Image (tube, rainbow, N blue to C red):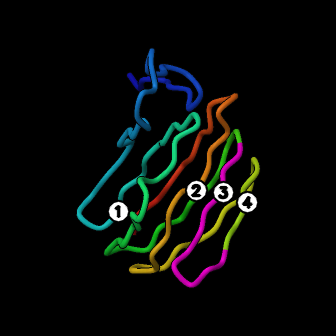
Amino acid sequence: MNALKNIFENLPKELREESFENILSTKDFKLERIISEGHTSPPNFWYDQDKNEFVLLLKGKAKLSFEDGSKLELKPGDYLIIPAHQKHRVDWTDPNQKTFWLTIHY
């Protein structure tokens, strides 16, 4: 029997750190749910990933910045593709509500 799940349920009791949940993965593909609540990337830290990343903001708000100086503010429904090795960071997530991300690394 298939187990029905809901992307907005089964939340961690406390979010001292961002929550990363691997939903599905293969050698070349990973689908994950990320939950943030006021979390940001550490100072002077940049994600520099080996794979492209599709990012969909499902709920909440967030701000991303890129090494080239560009910035994006995301609201529910916004999505983007971050090419492999494009350095980026999370500058802000809403501290007053949980922010739900769905990401695909490919």
> The residue tagged with tag 1: helix, strand or loop?
strand
Quick check: marks 2 and 3 in contact, CB under 8 Å? Answer: yes
Label 2 sits on residue: 91
Which is more toward the observer, 24 or 44?
44
- Please name which of the two marks, 4 or 2, marks the residue nearer to the observer: 2
Which percent across, then down, holds residue 11?
A: 49, 21
Which is more toward the observer, 28 or 78?
78
Q: Circle 3: is it few (<14), some (14-19), or many (20+) Cα within 10 Å?
A: some
Q: Which mark is residue 29?
A: 1
Which is more toward the observer, 52 or 87?
87
Q: Amino acid at mark 3?
A: Lys
Could you give the CA–CA distance between mark 2 and mark 1, rounded to whole angstroms? Answer: 26 Å
Label 3 sits on residue: 63
Label 4 sits on residue: 73
Q: Residue at x 55, y 21 (%)?
A: 9
Q: Residue at x 59, y 68 (%)?
A: 65
Q: Amino acid at mark 4?
A: Glu
Q: Mark 4 vs mark 1: which is more N-terminal?
A: 1
Q: Amino acid at mark 2?
A: Asp
Could you give the CA–CA distance between mark 3 and mark 1, rounded to whole angstroms? Answer: 25 Å
Q: Residue at x 76, y 51 (%)?
A: 75
Segment tinted magenta in the rendering = 61-70
